[in-house]
Amino acid sequence: MEQKTEIFNKALKKQVINDLAERALSTSFSYPILFIIYILFTTVEDDFPALTTVIGILYFSIAGLRFILSKKAEHFINNTNINWYFTFNILTLCAALTWSSYGCFICFNYGLKVESYLHIFIATGISAGASTALSTDLRLVNLFILTLLFPYIIWGLLYAPETTAAFGISILIYVLFLIIVNIKQNKWYIDSFTANYRLRNQAKELEKAKKVSEASVKAKSSFLANMSHEIRTPMNGVTGMLDILTETDLTQDQADLAESAKASANSLLNLINDILDFSKIEESKLELNTIGFNLREVLESLCDIIALDATKKGVEFSLLINSDVPVLLKGDPGRIRQIATNLCGNAVKFISSGEVFFSVSLQENDDDHATLLFKVKDTGIGIPDNKKRLLFKSFSQVDASITREFGGTGLGLTISKQLAEMMGGEIGFESTEKVGSTFWFTLKLEKQQRDDIITTNNADTLQDKLVLVAGFHQRTEMIICEYLRSLGIQYQAVKELNETLDIMKAAVSNHSISILFTGDNFDTTQVAYATKEILTYYTDTLPAIVVTKPFTQKTDMEWMEKNHISATLLKPVKLSQLELCLDTITDKNKPHLQADISMVVKNDEENPRLKILLAEDNSMNQKVAVKMLTKLGHKVEVAVNGLEAVKEFEQKEFDLILMDGQMPKMSGLEATKKIRAIEKSNFGRIKTVPIVAITANAMKGDRERFLASGMDDYLTKPLKKDDLITIIDKLFGTARL
């Protein structure tokens, strides 16, 4: 405490000296100037020439010394042995003493004449100015005023006439007034300096804290990057090997165990991703990408993932994107998918039976932008009113018992909220305990230049025909009917089997019914009965019969053929699959019997394959990548570091290089730069070989650094077969898969 007080006093004295010096620069020559004015308007110079000359020399000498001392204050204080403060005080008091002594001489010689009055008037003016100019030093300013005016008080009290006594008393009162003013001004000065001193110290402390914080953030970012790499590297081996294992011939028990291990590994990976995302958002290091994308493709692609968990719990999951929603947009599809996955995943997690309905509708629309409303509605446990405040808070869930039953960190909603707000949207919810919840978020997205036009011939092919939608749950029925309406196809929805058969029988004469969709309200026995009945009505051309089933349920091709089923439509129903189903049924050149309407990647040895160089130092990651790529029919050669990768590239021809970022001897970044330099200098090369980064780094700037080094794309570990298929398709087209 004493040390702090000493430091404060030193700082205060330094500030006082600086202020005194600064103010003295503008007031040093005020005394000589006032003296010149005085002798010009009086006869003193004529009456006492010698004294006037001496006084003038003294004034100019003192003024010059004060000016020099003030001008070079810092130099005198730091580089000489002169006590600046003491010297300045002596010169200042000498100026006051000179003026007052000269004034007393004038007053005693002239008495109550203009020379005395003018001299006293100037003295009071000087004292008033000094009260401000010297207020930084209370002792100095009071001594100055007393030295300057006290002789006039003595003259007034000692001089014979009564008027001078009153005059002396008036000056005494004025002096006391100035002393009081000086005390107040000095207090204001000290208080102001103290406040500024504290602010400066706080600013310094804040600057220090800022530097410490920046260093901490930098260390944290480095730690997160290293942890991301260190965790993802073994996770790549775990998830990759499990993916490969599940594709081998396993017994039912072995397959169940492998799937359980795979689900646990994916849960751990999701947790890692949540923590990394949360850390990046907290540090404002998460950046959004703005690219063109198809909203329908993005959301339909997550349907199967969510539906898989929902089906296991006996929960109905469905998706509806309203027909007026523009789907060709610009934004960050990955983050939109992340929010939707979080909300849909939570809905499925906290429900034991019932349904989860994910819908997208149009809120606002103009030529350039569309504001969309995303809703996830469930019939789950709901949220008590007194727990709603906990939502969207980091690491919080509604109840500790919920955490134990359902798991999770409570980060998903926090991240979703921050992502929605980063994209300029809002997020919220409505919930009733034991009834269900509706979580929603809005986004304003830029439209792509071209319009979203559905190109299909189904409406023309099915002109004057009716599609019968029979036996569906209300939600699925609504979705199928909405999609049919958007395609311009006439439809009729019915609930009961008997009503369905009556309508089919009535339409025999004009063949107005072309397709019958049957839902899961009709079991296989009822469907078989219905087809048998329909065959008795339609003796020539049988309407196409389509049954729906969960995508996890195996297709019984023998049963389909026996019961004249044309196709199966997987649930959750997607517009793209419905269109494909209709195209297949209405195309006369295609066989009517179709299995699940889905894309299948084939490993046909007759197709051309890629020769791939894999640069990876981790043996487990090598095994995962090699097995995945080999299963896809590609030939793979391995380099264990960047230096070896460059040598392999120089000696052999490759179609694709998969490059790890962190490797011994030479990093993936440096190896890529060298390969690009070789390509640039080697004019014999016809093409530039695509290089794709495969790395465990997932922090801000990683993608940019890889692309800046000359790489063509970027994959994050753990590596998955679907990601490899996607990137190869992107670079080479489906012919090379």
Image (tube, helix red, strand yellow):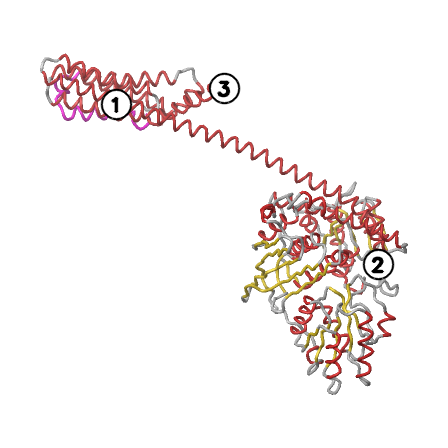
Instruction: Find residue 15 and report its image quarter.
Output: top left
**Mark 2 is on which residue type?**
Leu
**Is residue 45 a member of the stretch shown in magenta?**
yes
State the image coordinates of residue 428 (x, y, percent, origin top left). Answer: 58, 53
Rounded to the nearest whole Å, what is the CA distance between mark 1 and mark 2? Answer: 97 Å
* Residue sitting at x 12%, y 20%: 46
Relative depth, front residue between 620 and 124: 620
Judge from the rendering whether residue 658 lies leftward or rightward of residue 449; answer left or right: right
Measure the C-alpha gap from mark 3 to mark 1. Answer: 35 Å
Contact flag, marks 3 and 1 (Cβ < 8 Å): no
Residue type highlighted by circle 1: Leu
| SS type, badge 2 | loop
- Residue 555: image location, x then y, percent: 83, 66
Residue 214 located within the stretch drawn in magenta: no
Classify mark 1: residues with Cα within 10 Å, few (<14), some (14-19) or many (20+).
many
Mark number displayed over residue 632: 2
Q: Which residues are magenta?
A: 24-50
Label number found at residue 178 = 1
Picture disc at residue 1: 3
Up-down relation of residue 194 to residue 544 (above or below): above
> Mark 1 near mark 2, Cβ–Cβ under 8 Å?
no
